[in-house]
Amino acid sequence: MSRESGVIQRTSGILADLIVGKIHDRHTIADRFGVAVAAADRYIRQLQQVPGVVPVREGRRLAVRFDFGDAVPRPSHAAAVAACWASGLADVFAGSDYERGVRDALAYVTGRARRSSEFKNVDRKFLFLARGGDSSLPDTAAHLDDLVDAVLRNRYTAIEYAHFDGREETAQIQPLSMAIYDHQLYVIGARTDGTRYPFRLSRIKSVTVGTESFSYPDRAIYDPKQLFRDSFGIFIDETSPVVRVRVRLHERWRFFCRTHRWHPSQRVEDVPEGVIVTLSVRPCWELKAWILGFGKEAVVLEPPELVDDIRGAIAKMASNYEVSELAPKERKGPRRAHPTGRRNRGRRAG
């Protein structure tokens, strides 16, 4: 055996001992591997360059041991805080394994952070207020597991899906992304005709993951940020034109509009009557619901088609509240007066 190969074997042997939990000092190394104490000191100095090998001092005795925690770089403070923010998503996955997975990931990251003692009560210090979460969980947890697996492994998947209006569809899709919107879970899938659609987890009735894989598209072909750039919410309709939408809001919304963003394309303009919000989007029912949510404090200025749609919706809403439908039924016959002209208030005491 050459001198070089002997050094490599002894170094590997010492490291293997440390990994299984042994602690070595100059004497144990000398006895175990038949080297001089001075040579053992050199091995200790060299091994301390290996990530995870840490010194241990007991009085004047210097030893080394292996710390798996130090073998992997500790997360930065910013990464630990980011994990605290992300942990709020656990409620979205309530009832599934991912709820516990999010919390376990938080405990692991904050537990290994260099300032780990600061990360106490983080579930109350960093909040994500979920608006209900996905109502189908935990009943659809198995569907969620299958879809996550299909997305990760690029597997063709067949689903049975019920649309908002109750219409059912059986689709063969390429599951491209999992998304959370308005605290609901979606899989963005490409149908066989190339159209892409956000299938909501709670409306997926069955999932069958195939054995055949597809090639994940290049970013130039599929980029979720580009796909949703002109959408208002989770809506996708790549055939509809992008239009300029201008909505005038009551002046009480003036400051709010300066500190809030509904869409990346948003521009705000102060006018004497209030504030005008301009968006470049594809019109959809989510956009109309957003406008109607302002009630009488919003006026659509353009495009004309959207003005007509909102006007018609308001007229229909007004007809739902016609007095003839909601007024209380008239009493049959006149109210009979009390003989004394007033109601009997009972006898006076004593």
Image: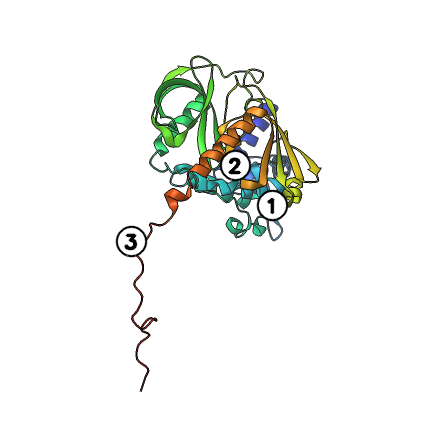
Viewer-proximal residue among 240 and 2: 240
Name the quadrant containing residue 49: top right
- Viewer-nearest residue: 236 or 248: 248
Query: Of the residues shown, which amino acid type is indicated by label 1?
Result: Arg
Q: Which-is-in-front pick, marks 2 and 1?
A: 2
Residue at (57% x, 48% y) in the render: 116
Query: Which one is in front in this view, the residue at disc 1 or the one at disc 3?
Result: 3
Q: Please name the residue that numbered disc 2 is placed on.
A: 292
Q: Is residue 9 left or right of 172 when viewed as pictured?
A: right
Q: CA distance from mark 2 to mark 1?
A: 50 Å
In the rendered image, residue 284, in percent from the top left (x then y), is placed at: 51, 27
Q: Is residue 87 above or below residue 200?
A: below
Q: Bin the neighbour count of mark 2 within 10 Å (Cα to Cα): few under 14, some 14-19, many 20 and up.
A: some
Q: Name the residue carrying label 1.
A: 114
Q: Quadrant of residue 139?
A: top left
> What distance separates the C-alpha of mark 2 from that of mark 3?
40 Å
